[in-house]
Amino acid sequence: MIITSCGNSLSIAKNVARQLHATFSPLTISSFPDGDIYLKFNTSVKGKKVVIIHSFQPDADKSLFDVIFAAETAKDLGAKKVILVAPYLAYMRQDKRFHPGEAISSRIMAKHLNPCIDKIITIDPHLHRYKSLKDIFTVSTVKLTANHAIGHYVKNHIKDPVIIGPDWESYQWAEVIAKEVGCEHTVLEKTRFSSRRVESKMVRPITLKGKNVVIVDDIISTGHTMIEALKKAKQEKARSIIGIGVHGLFVEDGFSKMKKAGFNQILTTNCIEHLTNKIDITSLLVDELKKER
Ligand code: R5P
């Protein structure tokens, strides 16, 4: 088995390879003077299983393009099987045509990956209107979750917590994590007015006063969703407020905005490399890839 990466997730890729006693060989990716992509494998992949470990952030569009080139090249060089491990899979939020004429990005992304990979493994993909990855992928799919790792972290590091999901889709994280921790939880009702403006209200109130409120979501992008949820916790006089995201994108200076808004702590998993990474998901990938050995 050869473990490689197009550039994102390099440290996870290295750790996974070390734990699996597999060869780690990163790709050379650069551009010709005119901007055309240049990509090169630096080890022989003929007859081997090639695992590309690459999160689709930063730079989702380049990631998709690089992964397609890497997977096609692996196949062309005689790889036995090409597995894409995308700890964060981008484009999943655009799962319908919200306005006439829009691209359904998630379908287009999957349509381009289907012919060049044999399997995709990802962590907490944003499944909202799709029931499963199978709705868009024709190849074998594995959906892992960081719920257990997050629950374990909260249980061991945060005293007297309550869990809040900032919108109803986040019940899939809030409910499971609260159960694991053994504490109360609720989800807020979020209205999104634009990609940068949201409003939230608490429809099933629980006591937040004096509690360490942990707001959990799959994606922290601009941070606005987290900040709206924080406002509710502040109104209810929470003792401290901690934001946890599986995937910390922190675009448009989201991290600074969240800190300024008053979060006591902001934590993420290392699905996307960031200084907030405190929850390690490497073992999830190692356990899954052991099945391929
Ligand atoms: C969408 O429903 C997701 O679960 C997140 O709530 C959303 O992506 C967060 O985006 P932002 O940080 O830009 O508010």
Image (tube, rainbow, N blue to C red):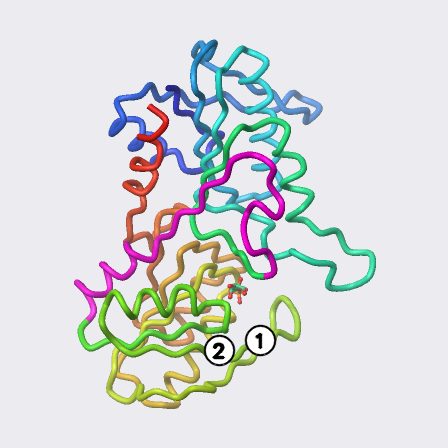
Horizontally, residue 182 falls left or right of residue 9, namely: left
> The disc labelled 1 sits on which kind of residue?
Val
For label 2, being within 8 Å of ligand 1 is answered: yes
From this view, report whether residue 184 is shown above or below residue 147. below
Residue that badge 1 annotates = 198
**Residue depicted at 65% across the width and 56% down the height:** 94
Measured along the vertical axis of the image, is residue 245 above or below residue 232?
Answer: above
Answer whether residue 133 is magenta in the image.
yes
Residue hosting label 2: 228
Q: Disc 2 vs disc 1: Cβ atoms closer than 8 Å?
A: yes
Label 2 SS: helix
Magenta highlight range: 129-158
Residue 74's disc is none
The yes-or-no answer for disc 1 within 8 Å of ligand 1 is yes
- Give percent across and percent down for residue 88: 47, 46
State the image quarter where residue 148 is shown: bottom left
Q: CA distance from mark 2 to mark 1?
A: 7 Å
Q: What residue do we see at 26% from left, 22% from top?
A: 21
Q: Amino acid at mark 2?
A: Glu
